[in-house]
Amino acid sequence: MIITVAAARVVASGGMMLVSPFTSYFTASIAVLTVAMLYQSYRSSMGTEGSDQMFAIIAIALLLGGNAFASPLAAKVCLAFIVLQAVLSYTTSGIAKLISPIWRSGSALPAVLSTHSHGLPAFGRLLSKHRNVALLANWFVIVFEASFALAIVSPNLALLYISAGVVLHVSIAYTMGLNLFLFAFTATYPAVFWAAESLRLREMLLS
């Protein structure tokens, strides 16, 4: 059953990439994907990670806002919901790191990367030897996450944060093996850029 559900997710994901939103084929694909993801979450005995939750949020939003019967307003509301979830996820994580003495001191990343479960011990030891680099890396993560809301202020800022986010998540995927976070959170970036463009257009129309 697990293999069947996983296969359904793969087929549905592939189907979504081959068709346009607001069509019956897209509706069927995203419906299958959403049900499969929710079923896997329900059946999981180990709980879900942040990436699983973000995938589920995106899938549900696309199902509600991108189906064949959705109105333009529904599509915009669902896109805005994805943006809100991305901003909340990054901002709360960044604030939590900001109030942590371990993160502010630059000790967090070397400590995490030195473990075998979520890191590359050799890379962790290398960071431990170069404290200034470790401090800079820690604060890059803190500032990026805590200030992510600025990404929707303008398209230029959106591109800056999106680029930084891709670099961050690729680095995390390589060093910590958290590959799903790369795909889950970067999947919100088109909606983030849309929000930044929408705000700029609104300002232009009102000026």
Image (tube, helix red, strand yellow):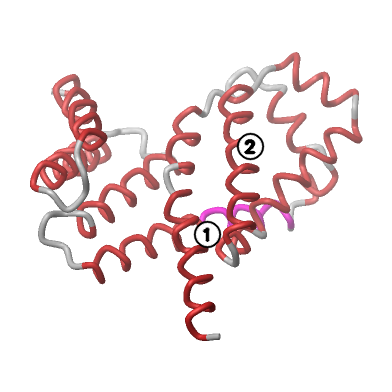
State the residue at coordinates (21%, 44%): 20
Q: Looking at the rendered structure, which numbered label has been put on residue 87? A: 1
State the residue at coordinates (58%, 30%): 170
Q: Tally the marks.
A: 2
In the rendered structure, which segment of residues is drawn in magenta?
89-98
State the residue at coordinates (36%, 39%): 47
Percent x, y for residue 132? 91, 35
Q: Along the polypeptide, which appears first: circle 2 or circle 1?
A: 1
Label 1: few (<14), some (14–19) or many (≥20) C-alpha neighbours in 10 Å: many
Please indicate whether residue 27 sits to the left or right of residue 85 in the image.
left
Q: Quadrant of residue 12?
A: top left
The extreme bottom residue here reads 207
Q: Which residue is mark 2?
A: 168
Please indicate whether residue 114 sits to the left or right of residue 90 in the image.
right
Q: Does residue 12 sit above or below 186 in this rendering?
A: above
As for residue 55 lying within the magenta part, the answer is: no
As for residue 95 lying within the magenta part, the answer is: yes
Q: Disc 1 residue type?
A: Val
Label 2: few (<14), some (14–19) or many (≥20) C-alpha neighbours in 10 Å: some
Q: CA distance from mark 2 to mark 1?
A: 16 Å
Percent x, y for residue 1? 13, 23
